[in-house]
Every structure is written in structure tokens, then in C-alpha cells.
Amino acid sequence: MAANDATGRVERPGLFRAVAAMMAAIAVALPVLGGPLAAGPAGISPYFANIVGQIATFALLAIALDLIWGYAGILSLGHGLFFAFGGYLVAMHMLKAGYAYNGVTPDVMTFMGWTELPAHWWGFESAPYALLLILLLPGLLAFGYGYFSFRSRVAGVYFAIITQALTYVAMLLMFRNDTGFGGNNGMTGFSTLLGFDVGAQATVVGLATVSVLVTLGVYLACGRLMRSPFGRILIAIRDDEDRLRFLGYDTLWPKLAVWTLSAVIAAIAGALYVPQVGIINPKLLSPELSIEIAVWVALGGRGALAGAVIGASLISALKFWLTGFAPDLWPFILAGVVLAIVTTLPNGLLDLRLPSLRARTARAAVAHAGARAGARAGARAGARAGARAGARAAARAGEPAAETGQGG
Amino acid sequence: MRRRSLLKGLGITALGASASSFPLPGLIRRAHAADTVKIGCLFSSSGTMANIEGRLNYVAQMAAEEINAAGGVLGKTVEVVVTDPGSDWPLYAQLGRQLIAQDEVASLFGCWTSVSRKSVLPVVEQNNALLYYPLHFEGEENSENVVYLNSPPSSSVLPAVEYLMSEEGGAAKRFFMLGSDYVWPRTINQQLKGYWTDKGFDPSAWREEYVPVGHSNFQTLVNEIRSFADQPGGQPIVVLTVVGNSIPDFFREFVNQGIAAFDVPVLGLDAVEADFEGLDTTELVGHLNCWAYLQNAPGPRNQEFLANWAAYVGANDVPFRPDVAIDPMVSTYDGVHLWAMAAEKAGSFDVPAVREASAGLSFACPSGYEIAMTMENTYVKRGVFIGSLNEAQGYDILWQSEGTPEPVPFSPYMNS
Amino acid sequence: MARRFAAILSLLCLLVPGGAAALDRAAILTEICSGDFRAQQTALESLAGAGAEAGREGALWARAVVQGFEGRDLRCGADAAFIDRSDGLVSAETLEPASPGGDLSAPSVNLRLRATAASAGFVLALFTEESAEARLRAAGRLDRRREAVSAAVLTAALETETDPAVAQAIGDIRTSLLLRDADPARRAEAIAAIAADATLRNRTTIAEALANEPDPAVQAAGKAALAEIDRTLAIGNALATLYSGASYASVLVLAALGLAIIFGLMGVINLAQGELIMVGAYATWFTQEAIRIVLPAALDWYLFIAIPVSFAAAALVGIAIEATVIRRLYDRPLMTLLATWAISLLLINAVRVGIGTQNLEFHQPGYVSGGFPVVGDFIMTSNRLFAIAIAAAAFFAVLALIRFTTLGMNMRAVTQNRAMAGAAGVDTRQTDRLAFGLGSGLAGLAGLALSPLYNVNPTMGTGFIVDSFMVVVLGGVGSLAGAVVAAFGIGQINVAIEPVYGAVAAKVIVLLLVILFIQRRPEGLFAPKGRR
């Protein structure tokens, strides 16, 4: 069908596949060039592998934000919260395991004068338990928070700022030492992960490879999901949520589902990131990181997972490179890039090609969703409303950007 | 079709560009010449710590120049690689890794806050590198990959507090501990409480409060200090372990609420001259700090150091004041020299050899003390000064230790 | 310990015949130069008694020596002491210019000696200061260190005192010293004198004295005095809490007022608002520096002269931001978030690179430094009072502007219904631009008012955005009065929680409360119905 085809083109299969192929190639190259061939001419150092691994987790984080911002039109300036949540949980696991199996006393116990870890550290030496919590807790937090927010129709700028406030609150809490998470120091000094020595070259390269693979897997899965009817409903929510509601859709649950999914993906990214940098502290909860995630997505292009991956990789690679030798320049470049993009390329790098087509496809998605709602209700009135909505949407499709007051 | 391949090209170029950009730092840096040896600096020149931490980069370079002028180390010229971790603790670890892996530095000099040291610690341990750390700190750490150039509490804070509790020091009987909420203040206060308990003080003699790093509104807390001070039980003092910009904010409120230094002296453990740049210190005269070096330290070594620094600032257009020298600067300076001496003695730049050769080395520090590396660990024996703030935003020496007390990495007062 | 010193001191004063012609200057100087702590202590105490023993002339000399000792300008030679003055050395004995031979060294000064020297300085000030105001200040300082002064010295000071207020103050201190007198009536008098100034410190003094008080009448009087002090202290503490809350609220109002206008009008969240505050503070600093050069006499008033400057500077920056960036993004509020964030990054780093990271040094005129005691232990600090005044003035000015001017009317119209206002002939773009300028200017004003309170550096503004947005949302979008009510609510709750759970917990609890509130009532406290 036409609508189906159109939705597919929002993602642009060519680009989507190219990025997937690129990631697959990196996932294969990393263990080979960083392992057996490390000493060879094309060999890569663990340091380089580590950076690739970190960038992969950033790309994963960007995918998470793109799901809700790019597809559902809900901007979160608090994705650092879920990223850090995953990171803290994995850090607790590594510290507790190191303490339980290798006898490495976590610093936080020393300077707080504790003889044993607080109750909420219970069971963290077990990897399956930690993994379960990584998937469960951030999801629960997101679900609870999202439920109240979406039900009260907190949206747009409000939602963005309140997520940031929530992250800020979490940062203040984490900075406190008596909450039992290491305060400003955070957690560092990890010795072991799943029985591997975190400092060993093989572990570093392995972790990086796993990060790329996980990112690739999530990327492919989300790509599929966003091409499904569920994805199209999200796009319709982004483009005109009120209309969709009038058409008989309950928008609460799709929003909640994608919001929770996004939070869980962010948490997974954090859980992969922390073992690679070897430290987590509340800095991850600072507003800067959360805004930077939005910048990655905005640069690469919202509403296209490939764009998110490209944006995150480009900017963080540039940052790694520049902070090394021209640190003063970096904030200016970042600010310049952001300003250039928001003023001239509303859809990021994707705008480098025919923006009107994209807008038209997005409008078509609303029409399609409207038609489906009508069909499901089985009522003539509904169908008519759907058709009308579709017609109106088509009439307005000439406008450049697929944005409304809430969708920006 | 044409479009699609164009896009694919774009994507691949984008990813390719990002991938190929990583090794560039290594390529862009000056080529590794056979007759140079590199050392790395991890001090922030941006972010919240920049104002005080940034100057350490220049001191390290100045020390390296001195060494090079005297013929270098093992016949090689010392080259300093400077980075900017931007006051971002995880970035210290990242850049530390980069210095070790990409730049292959012989040793690292870096970190101000304990948080940043804790962040770099796993990196140097995993790579068996050597970090020279120039700040006085909380102890409770004894890594063979860190040279602790400055004093743990046993040889800095405790002597100072002991002095304040003596008859001459004002016979302090009650203590208000106010700190930023992180490892250094927490540990220091933990040890102080143990120390006072050991001296027979009752817990009612002290109070402990923490504020977040960067806290600025001290209204309520200064109110509480005032009412704490006005209660019976003897001379009160404030042991201040807030850091960064909280220091001037605290003192401003303290003065405005009319508390004089003679009524309630404040022992500012992280207060240095540079913290008072925005303040009029006439009303603050008499507040205290304690370091292993003060600018007013007597002796020709200090005069020489101050003159060298002023000359270096003038010659290299350094964006810091030529007439201000603070303890961590001197400690960094000592560190570079100690490293050079150890490498010279070991006849090699290998970390294990340098570490082994370090034991027992001594150096004539600008503080006037002959400082020495201990034999059994990588601590340094330093002298202690207690300074008293004067009108000119500087510290007069109120008291200084007889010799260089033995540093004790793990405090006996920690969990008592 | 201190009490023992006081006893020794009064004993000394009794032993030395009153009004003796001359001090043994050489002996005192020898003691000070001896390097022996006890001897130095005794010497300083004799210096403190100089006014009583040797009259004004002796006091003047003693004060010069004490100041030299305190200021580390005293130099000890082999057999004579000197004071190092800016125009050369003078003999410490005669205060005549002198040129010593041999090595000179400064005597050691420890904390205890410095405290003794400071007390001696205050006592001597009673004898030597020309202005009654300075003498009164010295008496006030002495009142906090009664143990360092003797009744005999105060009696001597009273004899020469001409100003009634100072005489009263000195008399009160002298009465207070009778707390350990043998005569119960005098002890009761002392209690009354001390209780007249109801501070916690005085309460402690009385309570300690009562612990060993044998006389039931004095006991009863003391108990009554304590109860009275407690009442006053309670009032003072309540006021202090209110004042803290109000001053915190004033900071919030200042930071949020501009944001409220911009957000209410355009739905734009200006993440660079904090940096506009910074711009205002820097403009204030530049004004100060300019006045320092052009009109040094008016330096004390620079904060007032800077009011239009800081407003204009921030307003211009704001209008520039609006014209170059925001204007293009009116349909896309989320993009303005990113854009204004980028602008804030740019402003911070431009200032960092252009001016530096150090805290700027501000001259602190009398009206923004120190504070004045009100009731009990409540001290009203001037810098916060200044901020409260500016916040109130700014608020009423903006209110008037919105009520009574055409721009205000247009702004109200556009806020209520943009399309309709446009249709009715309001130039909405023009209104937006001016309102953005106004909001930015208010941020600049905030920077001015905050400069005596906080450190002024490139990153000073980053902490304000979440707080001020919470104020705006809580108050209700488009409602300035709502913002003020919200700010006061947040300020007071914060201050009430802070002493119990600490500063962080207070902030966390308040923010969580606001977030919860917004979930329940997204339109805020005072929003007009039917918006959003």
C-alpha cells in the first residue's frame, strides 16, 4: 500500500541498511583487529577499541531518544537519568562482586565508615539479579513517571523541562553520600565483570564488540518496530495527537510503551558504557549530557534511527578528538553546529535531501492511522472523520516541517 | 537509485570519518623524537576547577624546562604533554588512558580533587603507570601507582587541629565541621571525630554538616554556626572543607553576619590565596588554613622558586598571576623533580624501576623543608604550615612544624 | 581559662596604682620580643591597661605597639624594638624615626596572642579614638569579649568619656562584669544588664552564672531574665527564618521574572536566561570599573548607576538573540530549547575565553556589606536586603508596565490569544521582540542584584534555570503574581526544611513537590482557565 511504502521511506531503507552494515563490519573488525591481528599493520589498540565501544553506547542512547522524540514527538531532556540508572546498577554489581569474590573494599565504605554495604546493595554480587534490575528498575521508573505525566497530558516543553528537573533532582540526590551510592566520587575501581578482569585487553575489546553488537541488535529491532503499525501510530501521535484522540485512539498506552522501551534501552546503554569508562558519578545526571543527547539526535535527524546513530557517532567522535588537543574550541564548535542545524536544517543532516517529501510522508501517516482507527471502530462516522482528517492533513502537507506545538 | 547510493556514500563517509579521526591525536602531536621523553599533565584548564588547577600545567612545564636546562634526564629532553579534562571526573580517566596508550608518557602529573584521582586510579593501576598527585588529601589509599606528593591528614590536618586545641592556638574545645559532600571532607571529618573521641571529647563537642559541591547560599548554615558558637562549652572553631567557589561564598556570608575571626576562627582546609580573588579580606583577617607550603615560607629556595615562577609567567605569557604561588604548584614542581631524580637514579624510564629508585629520595623543597620519599611506600614526607589570612589576600605563617612528620596512609582514627 | 586570665588581669590592675605616671615601656617591649608566650601575653595585658594607667598619651603609644604587633610590623632588635611603617622604621619606645643596627626579626604571633592583642586594641580604642562612633563600635566588640577587660579599665575610660551613648555602652559592660561580685544585688544588676541584649551568647553567660548562684533572689531574677531572653530569641529565630526564606525567594523572583514573561508570552523556554543574568553581572562590573576611572567619588553608588546599564546590556543581548535565532523558531518550541542552550554555551565560553574564569572582584559599599541586628540573634544582612529591594522594585515596575502601557496591553493580548491579537492589529512580532528584550533585561537586573551575594564568573548562571522554570510553572504561565507567590512558597519551604534535613534534601523535596504538583495541576497555581 502507498501509506506503508511512505512510512518505510521516512527511515530511508538505503541509509538504514548502510548504517547497519557499517555497524556489522565494525563488530567483526573489532575482535579480529584488536585480538589476533592487534600487532599487525591494521591492528588497533585497546584504547581505540574502547573509544569505539563508548561511541556505540552513545549511539544506542541516541536510538533510545530518537524513539520517543523522533517518532513520538516527546522530547525528554532527562535521558541521562536512565543512562545513569543502568550505569549505577552495573557499577554496583561490579563493586559488590569485586568485594564478595576478590575482597576489594569499595571506597565508599571506607570514607563513610561503614563495615558493610547498605541494604539496597543486597544481592548485587549476582550478575543475573543485577541484569534483571537493569532491565526492570529504569523501566518501572519510566512507566510510573510516564503514566502520571501522560495521563495529566503534560507535554511539549513542559515535559522536556520536567524530565530535566527530575534528572537534576536525581543528580542532587546522588551527590549526597548518605544515599549510599558513592556521592560525588561515584563508583570506580572496578576489578571484575562476569569473571573477566576489566583491565585486560581481551575484556576491553570484547566489551567494545558486545556494545556494537547490542547497538546493532537494538537498531535492527527498533527499525522493524517503527515500521510496524505501532510505529505508525507513534508518528501520528507526533504529528497530531489531539486528532488521533478524537479519532478514537487511546494515545496514553502507545506513548507509555515507547517511553518505557526508550528508558530501558537508555539503561542498557548506560550498563554497557560504565564498565568501559571505569567510573560513574552523578556528572552523567547533569543537564549537559541530557541536552547533548538531544543534540545528537537533532543533528542526525529525528525520526530516522540511522540519523540518531550517525549524529551520536559524529559528535562524540569529534568531541573525543577535539578535547584531546583543542579543548577550548569544542564548546564553540558544538554551539555553532547546534545553531546552524536548528536554524537551517530543521531535520538535521537528513535535510540535506528534499525535506518536502519527508513532511508529506509524515502527514500521510496521520491519514493512514486515521483510516485504521475508523476501520477498527467499525463506525461510519469514524471512517468519515478519518477520511476528513486525512484530507486535511494532505492539504497541509505543503508546510515544511512536521511539527506542531507539541511535536517540535 | 542514484539518490540511495549517494546517501549510502554519505553515511559511510560520515562513519568512516568518525572512525578514522580517533588515531589522529597521536598523529597530530609532535612526532616522537628519539631524544625526548614525555610526561603527561592532567589538570583542568576549563570548568569549575580551572581557576586554581589550570596553573599546575604551567608549573610542570617550568620544572621540565629547569630539568632540560640542566641536561635533561638520562640525556633526553623532557617534553610535557598537556590535556584539559575540563573538571569532568570521568574525562580524567579517559585522557589518562589516552596519555598512557597514545602518547606513551613516562609518568603522569595530575588531579586536584580526590574524585578525579579516584577516577584515574584504575587506569594507572591497570596500565602499571605512575601518577604524581600534588594535593593534600584524605589518605586511606596506598597505591604503588600513585606518588602522593602531599600530606595525608595525619601529617597535615591533625597537627593543625592539634595546634588549635593547644593553649597557644586558642584552646579550641568545640568544632563545627562544614564540608562539601564528597570523599575528601567526609574522610577528613571521620578521622577528626575519631581523633577527638580519642582525646576524650564528647560527641556533643562537634557538629557535622555537608553541602553539595558548588553550594552558594550559606545563610542558614552560618546562622547555625553562630548559634553553635554561642552555646556553652569553650572556644569554638569551624573546620571548613567546602571546596571551589563555595569558599568565597561562605566567607562572604560569615563576614556579613558579623562573626569575627577571633570569635570563631575558620580553619579552611582547601582555602588558598586564589580563592579570595573576588573578596575584600580586611574583615576576614585571622582565618586559617594549613598546607605543606605557604607563599611566605622562609628561605632562599622559596625566593628562588618565586622568582623563577614570576620569570616564567612573564616569558611565556601565562594567564595566571606571577606573584601568587600556592601549595599544589610547589608540590607539582617537587613531583617533576622527584620523578627526574628517580629516573636518573634508576637509569631507566620504566615504571617499576623508577618506583624502586624513588624510595628515600630527597629534594630541597621551596617550602624550606628537605622533603623525602618514604622507604616503604610512595608517600612524601612534608612539613606543615598553618597560615593566617592577611589583608592582602595572602597567608601569614602562624605556625610551622619542627621537621617533616612521617605520613601515615591509613589513619588509626578512621573507624574509632 | 579565659576567666582565669580575667582574674589575673583585674588583679594586675588592682596592684598597679591607678593613674601611675608612666608605663615601663622598655620592659613591656622586652617582654613582647622575648618570644616567650606567657611573657608576651602579660605584656599585651599591661598594654591593654595603658589607658587606665597612663592616660590618653600612654594609650596612644600602647595602641601603636599593639597594632604593630597585630599587623606584624613590630621588629625586634638586640636591645630595642621598632615599628616598620610605610615611611620607614620608628622606635617602638618613642615612636620617633630611628635607624637600627643589627638584625631585626618579627616577634612570633600565635592565635591566642592575636586574640589578646585584638581585645587590647578595642580597649585602647576607647581611650584614643576621636569619633564617638568608632568608640561605640569598639565597645560593641568588647561586649563580646568581656573576659578580656577589667572593671578598673572601664572606669578609667568612663571618666574621660564625653559621649552619652558610648558612656552607656561602657557602663553596661562594666555592670556585666559584676556577675561574680560578692554582693547579690550587684549580681542581679549584672544579670539585668546582660539580659538587656537578648542573644544566645548572653543567655549562655547568665545560665552558666546561675549554675553556681547561691542567692535565691538572684536565681529567681536570673530565671525570669532567661525566660525573657528565650522569648526574644524565639521571635528572632522565626524572623531570621522568614528573612532567609524571603531572601531566597527574592533571588528566585529575580531569576524567574524575565523567564515568566518570555515563556508566558511565547511559550519559549530560554535556557540562556541564566547567562543573561551573568551578562547583567558583568555589565555591573564594567560599570564599576568605568566609574572607578571616571568618577571615583561616586564609586559607592555604582550599583545604582549600573541599574540601567545592566538592564540595557542584557536586553540588547536578548533582542539580538531574538532577532537572529528565536524568530526563526516560533513554531518549534522544542528547537528553541536546543538553540537557547547552544547560545548559553556560547555566552559562557565567550566570557571564559574573553575575560577569564576567575571570580570578579566587586567593591562592597556599606549598604551591601555587613548587617544590622534586629531582634535576638537575627541579623538582617544588607546584601540580601538589597536583593529583596531590587526584586520588589522590579516586580512592581513590570506590573505597572504591563497594566498601564501600550506594550503591556499588547503583551497581555498576545499572551491571551496570539491569533486574535494579531487579527486585531497588534504587531505580534514586534511585541515578541520587545517582550524578549524586557525579559532579558530583567535577567540583567537579577545579575546586578546578585553580584553582592554570589560569585560572579562565567558559569554563575547555570544553576538558575531549573529553579526559575519551576517557579514559573508553579505560579502559572503568564501570571507574574503567581510567580512571586510560588517563589515565596518555594523559598519558605526550602528554608524550613533546610535546618532539619540539610540543604540538598530541602532542594530535592521542594523540586519533587513541584513536579508532583505539576502532574496534578499542569496549569499551575494561577493560570487563566482554558489555556494550553
Image (cartoon, rainbow, N blue to C red):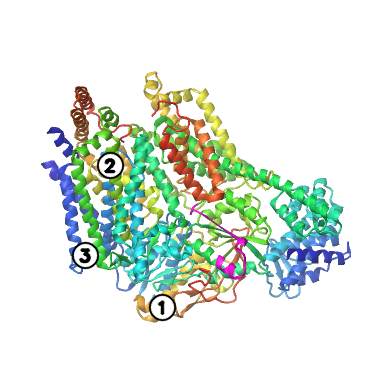
Name the residue rendered at 40%, 54% in the picture: A282
- Residue C399 placed where, x, y %? 53, 28
User: What is the CA distance from the residue labelled 3 to the residue labelled 2?
Assistant: 39 Å
The span shown in magenta is: B193-214
First reached walking from the N terminus: tag 3 or tag 2: 3
Name the residue carrying label 2. A257
Name the residue carrying label 3. A34
Residue A28 in sight: yes
Task: Using the rendered view, name the quadrant where residue B396 is placed.
Answer: bottom right
- Measured along the vertical axis of the image, is residue A390 above or below residue A218? above
Q: Is residue B212 magenta?
A: yes
Chain at tag 3: A
User: 10 Å neighbourhood of mark 1: few (<14), some, or many (≥20)?
Assistant: many
Q: In front: B172, or B36?
A: B172
Q: Is residue B209 magenta?
A: yes
Chain at tag 1: B
Task: Using the rendered view, name the quadrant where residue C43 is placed.
Answer: bottom right
- Residue B328 placed where, x, y %? 49, 65
Q: In front: B352, or C68?
A: B352
- Residue C59 placed where, x, y %? 81, 59
Q: Look at label 1 and name its amino acid.
A: Ala
Q: In front: B227, or B91?
A: B227
* Relative side of C8 to A19, left or right: right
Mark 3 vs mark 1: same chain?
A: no
Do labels 3 and 2 touch, CB within 8 Å? no
User: What is the CA distance from the residue labelled 2 to the residue labelled 1?
Assistant: 61 Å
Q: Look at label 3 and name its amino acid.
A: Gly
* Relative side of B396 to A189, left or right: right
Name the residue carrying label 1. B342
Chain at tag 2: A
Mark 1: secondary structure: helix
